[in-house]
Image (spheres, helix red, strand yellow):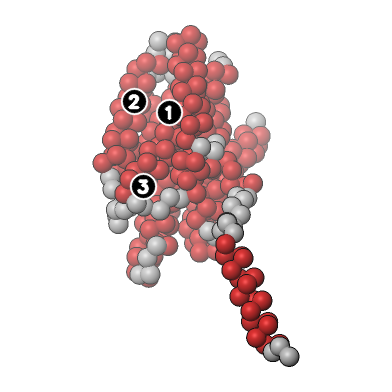
């Protein structure tokens, strides 16, 4: 009479062998949440740029502001961000670094993004040459210098560097603010590029953009370290300049008795306040969520601007 335990053991071993002989079971790829796709597709930065271009055009009383200004800015910003992420993905892969979600997504769809970049840059160039005045070329020259400096630092900096790339972030914020403000200021023929650079509106917005970009790197740097002192330092490196920016914007808004630029500075103040809140509660969110929320912190001020404009009117 056979022994039941031995039969069970034999059958179990046979089933195990049959399972191991088959192809390995590959876990399904985790689907990304819908709210992350604007970041994965590099659509977040163009949305912010176009929204603030509207604010600049209304603040500076641009009488004629055609659609091609918005399309050109959106396409150019999108193309620059895609190139930056493809470059980061390439450098991270070369050094063995771990790719972040947006970089991995761009690397996975590299061919489509490269083709999209070519179309975007070509279309933007056609719009500039065919529709815009010659005065834009003075702005473009300085803009190209800033962008070239940014990509130069991107290629020279190590992807595994322990320090936050402050110089790169400053150039990125300056370039983003310059391109956005430029597409409104170029339609003020009596003024020039240096008038724009010296304006309060440009300086405050550029400072906000620099802090927004720096926040992501500081948060990532703090999250990757167990040193509590480093985390506290990262928080202070944002808290102090954001507070100063808020005070300056509040001062400019209150002192503008004609209400011409008050809504603009209220918008920048709102963006600084939202980043300040995110800086304090960042531990509740993942890094992907923080990147999206940092963009939201620059989009919500548009509603504040519109509300302030309505009250001023």
Labels 1, 2: front one: 2
Instruction: Give above or below for 239 relative to 264.
Output: below
What SS does tag 2 mark? helix
The disc, 3 or 1, on the residue closer to the chain's N-terminal end is 3
Name the residue that disc number 1 marks. 179
Name the residue that disc number 2 marks. 144
Question: How far, Cα to Cα, is label 3 from label 2?
Answer: 25 Å
- CB under 8 Å between callouts 3 and 2? no
In the picture, the disc for residue 136 is none
Residue 12 relative to residue 163: left or right: right
The disc, 3 or 2, on the residue closer to the chain's N-terminal end is 3
Question: How far, Cα to Cα, is label 1 from label 2?
Answer: 10 Å
What SS does tag 3 mark? helix
- CB under 8 Å between callouts 1 and 2? no
Which image quadrant is residue 142 in? Answer: top left
Write the residue at 39% across / 13% down. 135
Name the residue that disc number 3 marks. 92
Residue 157 at what x, y percent from top left?
28, 45
Labels 3, 2: front one: 3
Question: How far, Cα to Cα, is label 3 from label 1?
Answer: 28 Å
Q: Residue 43 versus residue 254: which sits nearer the camera?
A: 43
């Amino acid at each position: 009479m056979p022994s039941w335990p031995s039969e069970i053991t034999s059958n179990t071993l046979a089933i195990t062998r049959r399972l191991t002989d088959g192809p390995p079971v590959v876990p399904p790829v985790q689907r990304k949440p819908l709210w992350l796709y604007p970041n994965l597709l590099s659509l977040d930065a163009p949305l912010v740029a176009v929204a603030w271009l509207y604010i600049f055009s209304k603040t500076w009383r641009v009488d004629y502001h055609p659609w091609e200004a918005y399309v050109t800015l959106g396409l150019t910003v999108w193309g620059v961000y895609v190139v930056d992420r493809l470059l980061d993905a390439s450098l991270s892969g070369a050094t063995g670094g771990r790719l972040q979600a947006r970089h991995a997504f761009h690397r996975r769809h590299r061919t489509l993004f490269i083709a999209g970049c070519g179309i975007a840059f070509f279309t933007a160039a056609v719009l500039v040459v065919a529709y815009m005045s010659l005065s834009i070329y003075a702005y473009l020259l300085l803009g190209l210098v800033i962008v070239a400096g940014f990509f130069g630092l991107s290629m020279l900096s190590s992807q595994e560097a322990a320090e936050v790339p402050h110089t790169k972030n400053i150039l990125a914020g300056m370039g983003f603010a310059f391109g956005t403000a430029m597409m409104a200021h170029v339609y003020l023929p009596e003024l020039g590029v240096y008038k724009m650079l010296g304006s309060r509106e440009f300086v405050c917005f550029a400072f906000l953009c620099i802090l927004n970009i720096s926040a992501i790197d500081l948060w990532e740097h703090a999250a990757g370290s167990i040193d509590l002192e480093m985390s506290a330092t990262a928080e202070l490196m944002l808290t102090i300049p954001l507070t100063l920016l808020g005070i300056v914007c509040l001062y400019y808004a209150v002192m503008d008795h004609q209400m011409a630029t008050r809504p603009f500075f209220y918008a920048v103040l709102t963006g600084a306040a939202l980043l300040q809140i995110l800086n304090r509660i960042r531990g509740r969110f993942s890094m992907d969520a923080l990147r999206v929320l940092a963009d939201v912190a620059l989009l919500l001020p548009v509603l504040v601007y519109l509300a302030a404009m309505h009250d001023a009117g």
